[in-house]
Image (cartoon, grey):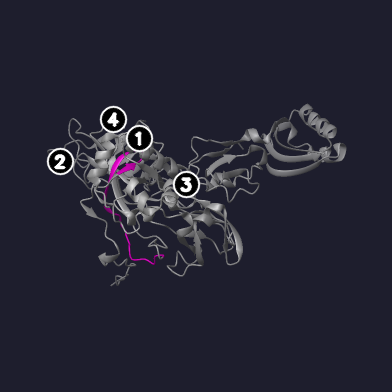
């Protein structure tokens, strides 16, 4: 018997909704059986907490007196440059933006201790941030410079807007070379010294809805401790990758674009992040409710760490040189045990995505729904799935001939 | 036999004296230097693992303190800021003595101070600056 989102929301209103986390549902589904569990369970909550580089935030400052046109000018927040190619009082800051005088990797490996992600965390913490702006001045916007403190509460709008988050599965990074590598997958010790992975596995949102049968444009979510929405599929969304028999992608596949009101969020779930030798970014907590509309959807949410396989990729050669052949495949149960086997060698593992926090997010979202504080939405349109014909293209270079 | 991990803080006037060799020869202690940072005419810091008979250890450390060297347990110098830690586990596979450890059931990271050798690898590995060595 199929359920509808409206019926589930009615149950939330009446306080009769049955919710489990994506971890709990594994046993619940097994004990009750798929048929009974699909009837009784209304929602399964997921969670993930990891570095997500294609994140940022846009703001509206309000108009100064006299007016200043930030558009086409320059804006710095705590020395981190923001994007100003917008109207007079709007600007956007990206998570990986760095102060212009940051030495980057000139002193290798660079520390990247402060960037756009840290600015966003400071604003969400309620702290004052220094805004320095330069403009060219016009008849209607005569002011040419501005130096002021701003805080989140003073801004008209402050919106987290991320163009690619919550990757459905990801590489496991190793290093076959003889030197330490500093990557976005963390520090990789030489000669298979460690293996770093980055997914919440069985708790991860898109791994619980592998064919995007419930998640789509307008899906209401937990975002950074507040409420956000799925805007659509994220950049590099690629449903057409190799999948297991149960439909679980065996590598990075789907992605999400999300947005939400920054003023409702908390620094606990938005953390400025620094990868030595690589750059700065933002770590974000995202939780997505999966409505259990039918048995098929319930079965997807029962996915276990041992059912989810990820490719082991060498970041000394294969990754930077775009060689796609992985060294092998491992599952998340193995990864979370602390060691995997690669080329016959036992390799210790580390996560970059916090399973501990992912579980907390799924639990919080579950409580919000049980308490009647969070209702589900019916997506306007589902994310493009395997039938979409999406082909993920590598870059085709067409060098410009110098005359 | 006892083993202790300590930090020696040298005042400038002791820096040029042979101190460790005294500990070895006169007090029969085994000294393993984990880290050292001493510049002439400036203060120096030394992270050591000292092994020996309890009485000899006490006497050796007493001698060091008499010289004006400040002695403190290593654990005080390495800090894990739990509020900054996201329990991502990035540190656990690179920590040689497994001082940073994860409970595989809860996936929660914890810091076992007494195992730490102050190698500093976690400082670079932690994306959230949750580890600090005052060194």
- Where residue A345 appears, as percent x and y from the top left, is 61, 63
Marking on residue A138 = 2
Q: Is residue A367 visible?
A: yes
Q: In which chain is the residue bearing label 4?
A: A
Question: On the image, numbered disc 3 is attached to which residue?
Answer: A355
- Of mark 2 and mark 1, the one earlier in the sequence is 1
Q: Residue at x 36, y 38 (%)?
A: A225
Disc 3, disc 1: CB below 8 Å? no
- Of mark 3 and mark 1, the one earlier in the sequence is 1
- CA gap between label 3 and label 4 equals 32 Å
Stretch in magenta:
A221-244
Marking on residue A67 = none
Query: Residue B19, relative to residue B124: is it above or below?
Result: above
Asked whether the residues under marks 2 and 1 belong to the same chain, the reply is yes
Mark in front: 4 vs 2: 4
Question: On the image, numbered disc 1 is attached to which residue?
Answer: A124
Q: Residue at x 31, y 52 (%)?
A: A256
- Of mark 4 and mark 1, the one earlier in the sequence is 1
Q: Secondary structure at mark 2?
A: loop
Asked whether the residues under marks 3 and 1 belong to the same chain, the reply is yes
Question: As rendered, which of B92 and A229 lies closer to the eye?
Answer: A229
Mark 4, Cα crowd under 10 Å, few <14 / some 14-19 / many 20+, is some
Q: In which chain is the residue bearing label 1?
A: A
- Of mark 2 and mark 3, the one earlier in the sequence is 2
- CA gap between label 4 and label 2 equals 29 Å
Q: Secondary structure at mark 3?
A: helix
Mark in front: 2 vs 1: 1
């Amino acid at each position: 018997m199929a359920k509808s989102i409206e019926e589930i929301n009615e149950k939330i209103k009446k306080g009769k909704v049955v919710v489990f986390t994506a971890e709990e549902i594994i046993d619940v589904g097994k004990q009750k059986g798929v048929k009974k569990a699909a009837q009784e369970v209304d929602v399964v909550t997921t969670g993930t907490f990891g570095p997500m580089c294609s994140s940022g935030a846009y703001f509206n400052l309000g108009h100064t007196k006299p007016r200043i046109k930030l558009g086409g000018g320059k804006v710095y927040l705590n020395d981190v440059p923001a994007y100003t190619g917008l109207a007079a009082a709007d600007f956007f800051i990206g998570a990986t933006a760095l102060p212009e005088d940051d030495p980057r990797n000139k002193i290798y490996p660079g520390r990247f201790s402060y960037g756009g992600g840290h600015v966003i965390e400071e604003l969400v913490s309620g702290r004052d941030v220094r805004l320095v702006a330069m403009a060219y001045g016009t008849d209607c916007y005569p002011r040419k410079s501005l130096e002021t403190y701003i805080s989140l509460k003073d801004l008209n709008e402050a919106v987290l807007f991320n163009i690619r988050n919550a990757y459905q599965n990801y590489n496991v990074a190793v290093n076959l070379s003889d030197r330490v590598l500093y990557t976005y997958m963390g520090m990789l010790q030489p000669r298979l010294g460690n293996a770093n992975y980055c997914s919440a596995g069985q708790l991860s949102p898109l791994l619980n809805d592998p064919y995007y049968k419930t998640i789509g444009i307008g899906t209401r979510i937990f975002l950074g401790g507040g409420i956000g929405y799925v805007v659509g599929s994220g950049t590099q969304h690629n449903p057409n990758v190799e999948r297991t028999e149960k439909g679980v992608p065996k590598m990075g596949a789907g992605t999400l674009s999300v947005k939400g009101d920054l003023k409702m969020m908390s620094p606990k779930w938005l953390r400025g992040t620094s990868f030595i030798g690589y750059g700065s970014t933002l770590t974000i907590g995202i939780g997505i409710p999966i409505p259990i509309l039918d048995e098929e959807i319930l079965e997807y949410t029962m996915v276990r760490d041992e059912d989810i396989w990820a490719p082991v990729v060498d970041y000394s050669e294969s990754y930077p040189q775009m060689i796609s052949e992985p060294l092998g495949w491992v599952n998340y149960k193995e990864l979370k045990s602390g060691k995997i086997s690669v080329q016959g060698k036992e390799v210790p593992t580390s996560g970059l995505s916090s399973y501990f926090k992912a579980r907390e997010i799924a639990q919080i979202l579950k409580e919000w729904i049980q308490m009647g504080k969070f209702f589900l939405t019916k997506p306007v349109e589902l994310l493009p799935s395997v039938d979409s014909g999406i082909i993920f293209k590598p870059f085709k270079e067409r060098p410009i001939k110098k005359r | 036999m006892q083993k202790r991990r300590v930090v020696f803080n040298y005042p400038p006037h002791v820096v040029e004296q042979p101190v460790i060799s005294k500990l070895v020869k006169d007090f029969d202690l085994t000294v393993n230097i984990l880290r050292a940072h001493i510049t002439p005419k400036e203060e120096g810091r030394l992270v050591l693992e000292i092994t020996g008979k309890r009485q000899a250890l006490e006497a050796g450390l007493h001698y060091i303190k008499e010289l004006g060297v400040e002695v403190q347990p290593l654990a005080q110098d390495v800090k894990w800021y739990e509020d900054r830690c996201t329990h991502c586990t990035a540190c656990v596979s690179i920590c040689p003595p497994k001082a940073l450890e994860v409970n595989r059931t809860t996936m929660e990271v914890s810091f076992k101070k007494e195992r730490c050798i102050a190698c500093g690898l976690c400082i670079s590995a932690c994306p959230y600056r949750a580890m600090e060595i005052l060194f």
